Image (cartoon, rainbow, N blue to C red):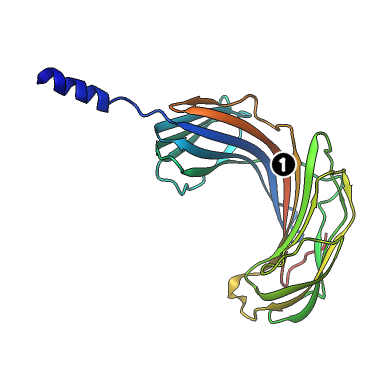
Amino acid sequence: MTSMAFTLLSQSARPLVGSVSVGRDEAYWQNLKGNSSTPDSRYLVNYAVKVSGSSDRLTITDKTRANMTQIVITSEYSNLQTSYDPSNGEIKIELTKLVEGENYTIQVAFQVPPQGMFEGAAPATTCTPAPGYGYSGKLEVDIAPFKLKDADELKEVGVYSWFTVLVTGKTIVSSSPAADALPPDYEAIWIYKSPTAEYGAHMATYNVTITPDASAGDILLRTWIEADYQKSFMMSSDPVFDGAQASFKNLGASHILQYEYTIGGSNGL
């Protein structure tokens, strides 16, 4: 009986090694509120983890540039820990008690200087007429022309425009170039799958109703320009996995500008 009990205990202590698929992408992201001269500029490393076989744990060891300042992000996952060693650039992600069918989206963020996404100034977003709280009627949203500084290994460019909760009703009337804009959100979306470095203006005209309540903030809409590249920016190698069998895919890198148009602010550059 003693021998049998020992055997059962040994089997229960055996680690559960499952399988995962992991994708990684990078982004240089900057947020410009109106004509602010000091954008919030970040370097982001994003991991998508899909669990196809349960595991007791998964450790991902990756490497980026050393001596950066990490931004601490509160995780929504209680079984996740992330760390960054500025002395050598090592990123470590530790997950425990992974269950088959779970998906994780994990971001490691760093504060960095603006990276110069464009030739010249970042393209401004303007609205005609300049709307206020309680405005109802036609509104033309214009994103200025722009030229990307880096067109090497460029695979796709996207331009987007969407309203915040300040707009309680909206219908798109026209756009140039023609944008994808589907109900009920009617966000304007332009996707260029054979991208070049240089782009003209983008315009979308809406019928809108803007709330008279200023308590929801001053950001009326956001525009987003994203340039996707096949190359990596700062990752020096593929990550190393421990605790689970893993398949890995490098999803490339992006330059992203988010422009926030504000009511009552100065939005021209």
In the rendered image of this protein, does residue 185 appear above or below residue 103? below
Q: Residues within 10 Å of mark 1 (few under 14, many from 20)?
A: many
Q: Quadrant of the N terminus?
A: top left
In the rendered image of this protein, does residue 138 appear above or below residue 227? below
Percent x, y of residue 109 = 59, 42
- The answer to whether residue 90 shows anywhere in this view is no
Q: Quadrant of the C terminus?
A: bottom right
Closer to the camera in the image, 128 or 16 = 16
Q: Quadrant of residue 230?
A: top right
Q: Is residue 162 left or right of residue 238?
A: right
Closer to the camera in the image, 142 or 171 = 171
Percent x, y of residue 108 = 56, 40
Percent x, y of residue 173 = 81, 73
Q: Quadrant of residue 195?
A: top right
- The answer to whether residue 100 shows anywhere in this view is yes
- Looking at the rendered structure, the kind of residue marked 1 is Ser
The residue depicted at 77 percent of the width and 81 percent of the height is 137
Q: Is residue 166 left or right of residue 123?
A: left
Q: Quadrant of residue 253?
A: top right
Closer to the camera in the image, 265 or 98 = 98
Residue that extends furthest to the left in the rendered view of this protein: 1
The residue depicted at 68 percent of the width and 77 percent of the height is 210
Residue behind mark 1 = 254
Give the structural element (helix, strand or loop) at label 1. strand
The residue depicted at 75 percent of the width and 54 percent of the height is 37
In the rendered image of this protein, does residue 171 appear above or below residue 148? below
